[in-house]
Image (tube, rainbow, N blue to C red):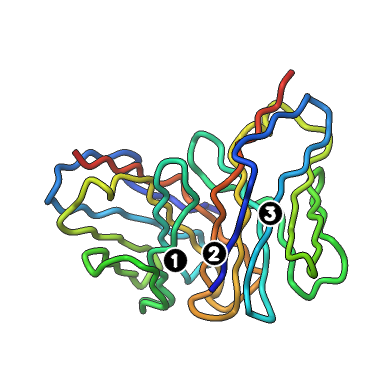
Amino acid sequence: ETGVTQSPTHLIKTRGQQVTLRCSSQSGHNTVSWYQQALGQGPQFIFQYYREEENGRGNFPPRFSGLQFPNYSSELNVNALELDDSALYLCASSLESGFLSGGYTFGSGTRLTVV
Amino acid sequence: AQKITQTQPGMFVQEKEAVTLDCTYDTSDPSYGLFWYKQPSSGEMIFLIYQGSYDQQNATEGRYSLNFQKARKSANLVISASQLGDSAMYFCAMRSLAGANNLFFGTGTRLTVIP
C-alpha cells in the first residue's frame, strides 16, 4: 500500500505571492489534515478535511484554505504569503475522523521558503 | 484546551543503552490518546507508539515503551537498546475526541545516540 505523498518537496516564493501544496492520502484513508512546522517547533494544526468537507480548523487566518477531492487527495492554498509562512508543511491522512486510536500517516512534507 | 510539554530540548545516550524522553500533558477531556512520533532529518513523522487514556497497561512496541502515569499526566517514552539510527527529533502528541480530533504536539526532543 502506498503512503502519503506530498508535492513539491521544496518551494521558494516571494512575499505576497500565492502557493498551492498537494497531498495524496494513503489508500483507504478518507481524512486529511495539514500541519505547519516552523523551524525548531512542533507541528501546528491548520485544518482537517473529512469526506471533502472542512472538519475543523486551527488558529490560522483565512488566507490559508484547502480542498479535498473525491479521491481524498488534498490541496493547501496560502494567499498573500508572509515571511513567517516559511515552514515545513506536513500532510497527514487517517482512516476516520473520529477514530481516537487511529494513527495518522504523515508525508515527508513540503519545505516552503518565503523571501 | 490541550497542551503538551517536552522539557528536554536535547538528550544524549550511549549506543545500546536505554533512554527516557519526558512528556507531560494537560487536558480536560475524559477520553484522549497519546502518541509518540519520530522525525528524522528527512522531515517525515514516523508513528512509534500509542496509549489510550483508558488503557490499563502501558503500551509497548518492540524497543519502545510508554510509561503512562495518568494521575501525573505524564507519558514518557522509553527506548531500550539505543541504535545509531534512533538519532532524530521525537515528538509527543495528544488527540481527543473533541473538535476535529487533530493532534497537539510538543516542541520535541532531539535525541543523539553516541557510538
Identify whether B106 is placed above or below A61.
Answer: above
Amino acid at the residue labelled 1:
Val
CA separation in Å, label 2 and label 3 = 15 Å
Where's the N terminus of chain A, which quadrant?
Answer: bottom right
Please name which of the two marks, 2 or 1, marks the residue nearer to the observer: 2
On whether disc 2 and disc 3 are found on a single subunit, the reply is yes
**Residue A92 rendering spot, x and y as whole percentages:** 48, 59
Q: Nearer the viewer, residue B40 or B75?
A: B75
Label 1 crowd (10 A; few <14 / some 14-19 / many >=20): many
Label 2 crowd (10 A; few <14 / some 14-19 / many >=20): many
Residue at 71 percent across and 49 percent down: it is B22
Where's the C terminus of chain A, which quadrant?
Answer: top left
Read off the residue under disc 1. Answer: A32
Read off the residue under disc 2. Answer: B103
**Residue A63 rendering spot, x and y as whole percentages:** 21, 65
Parent chain of label 2: B
Relative to A87, B77 lies left or right: right
The label number, if any, that marks residue B23 in the structure image? 3
Relative to A59, B23 lies left or right: right
Query: In terms of secondary structure, where does tag 1 sit?
Result: strand
